[in-house]
């Protein structure tokens, strides 16, 4: 036990208490454990600097759940995931838009488009061996959401397709199509709309519950028996990018009710952004790991990922504010 009269130890106690100032009351045993962590880091100067810089913004010692799984037990992992999801949900916001501005959301995917997507005319699909083709996403969407959600939205979507050959190298381009729809009803406005469980559009989702547990039960029950994968709920969450902030927050909180949900990766960098991955490991999901990557700074969704054997598919999301419909945000 360190000497309690040691001024260095007294300073450590001050740091621990300052870090815990905004966190729920804890037991003496929890405080002692946190104190010992800080003391251990104090003996390692390089790591201490890192902890001191983080402590100002995050209660790292007390609530290790947000960035570090608390233990290897399934119960603790579930609690860790719940903490991440609750914290992220509390940060979700919509940007403050001026009268003629748009919330911009971009999706780029290594997976084929949804089954209901209307493919542009093309003679052939790109082979998987083409390096030039692989530099393009297989499917992409750009959506412009107006300040008034009931007004007309605009969406540009497309698929990667073969454009020709140069020698033995296959060349690809991106065939796009655009559409407009009031209140973001791009899929449900089609003559043959997809099944309700495949989409999360604002108008369609308006009747969904705001209670997280009720939201989970409602959406998970809508998955057809022929496609029972638990991971489909994570796909639901990732497809909620067009929903307003309160519903996106509810989806994040609802995810903690997913059986077996855990922190699958404490830190992952995608498209230059670092987040924490929460989802289902392969052992809990029929051999397929599925997760969402959350930005801990603002609760936004960075990516949705699916790993099966040695294959990986990923959807990457980016956001911004556009001055005009159909134009990307500046900068």
Image: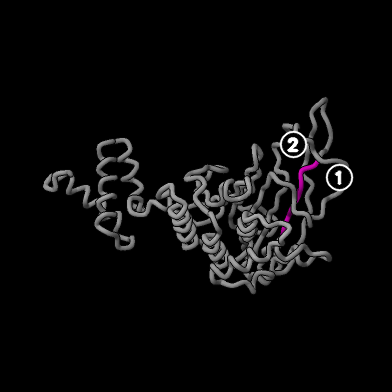
Counting residues from the N terminus, which is met first, the one under dot 2 or under dot 1?
1
Residue 261 tag number: none
Q: Residue at x 57, y 43 (%)?
A: 271
Q: Is residue 144 magenta?
A: no
Q: Residues within 10 Å of mark 1 (few under 14, many from 20)?
A: few
Tell me the chief SS of the magenta region: strand
Image coords of residue 140 (percent x, y): 70, 49
Q: Residues within 10 Å of mark 2 (few under 14, many from 20)?
A: many
Image coords of residue 299 (percent x, y): 50, 57
Q: Is residue 165 placed above or below 144 in the rendered structure?
A: above
Q: Nearer the viewer, residue 82 or 186?
A: 82
Q: Residue furthest left?
A: 5
Image coords of residue 201 (percent x, y): 68, 65
How was this image coloured? one colour
Residue 276 located left or right of residue 100: left
Q: Residue at x 38, y 51 (%)?
A: 64
Q: Residue furthest top?
A: 167
Q: Is residue 156 magenta?
A: yes
Which residue was labeled with disc 1? 122
Q: Nearer the viewer, residue 38 or 177?
A: 38
Residue 307, located in which quarter of the rendered image? top right
Residue 137, located in which quarter of the rendered image? top right
Q: Secondary structure at mark 1?
A: loop
Residue 192 located left or right of residue 287: right
Q: Residue at x 80, y 32 (%)?
A: 170
Q: Residue at x 41, y 48 (%)?
A: 71
The tally of labels here is 2
Q: Is residue 68 visible?
A: no
Residue 133 tag number: 2
Residue 146 located left or right of residue 55: right
Q: The magenta stretch spans which residues? A: 155-161
Q: Is residue 185 visible?
A: yes
């Amino acid at each position: 036990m360190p000497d309690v009269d040691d001024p260095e130890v007294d300073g450590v106690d001050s740091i621990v208490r300052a870090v815990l100032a905004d966190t729920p009351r804890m037991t003496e045993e929890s405080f002692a454990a946190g104190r010992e962590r800080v003391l251990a880091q104090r003996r390692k100067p390089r790591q201490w600097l890192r902890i001191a810089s983080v402590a100002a913004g995050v209660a790292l010692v007390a609530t290790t759940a947000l960035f570090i799984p608390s233990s290897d037990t399934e119960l603790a992992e579930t609690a860790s995931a719940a903490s991440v999801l609750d914290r992220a949900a509390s940060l979700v916001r919509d940007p403050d838009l001026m009268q003629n501005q748009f919330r911009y959301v971009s999706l780029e995917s290594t997976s084929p488009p949804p089954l209901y997507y209307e493919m542009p005319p093309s003679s052939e699909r790109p082979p998987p061996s083409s390096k030039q083709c692989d530099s393009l996403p297989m499917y992409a969407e750009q959506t412009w959401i107006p300040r008034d959600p009931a007004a007309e939205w605009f969406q540009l979507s497309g698929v990667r397709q073969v454009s020709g050959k140069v020698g033995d190298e296959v060349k690809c381009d991106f065939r796009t199509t655009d559409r407009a729809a009031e209140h973001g009803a791009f899929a449900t406005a089609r003559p043959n709309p997809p099944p309700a469980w495949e989409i999360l559009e604002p108008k369609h989702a308006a009747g969904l519950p705001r209670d997280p547990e009720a939201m989970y039960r409602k959406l998970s029950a809508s998955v057809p028996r022929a496609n029972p994968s638990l991971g489909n709920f994570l796909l639901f969450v990732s497809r909620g990018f067009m929903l307003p902030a309160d519903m996106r927050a509810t989806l994040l909180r609802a995810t903690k009710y997913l059986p077996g949900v855990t922190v699958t990766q404490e830190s992952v960098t995608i498209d230059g952004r670092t987040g924490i991955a929460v989802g289902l490991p392969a052992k809990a999901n029929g051999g397929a790991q599925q997760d969402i990557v959350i930005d801990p700074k603002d609760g936004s969704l960075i990516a949705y990922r699916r790993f099966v054997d040695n294959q990986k598919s990923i959807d990457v999301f980016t956001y911004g504010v556009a001055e005009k419909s159909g134009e990307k945000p500046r900068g």
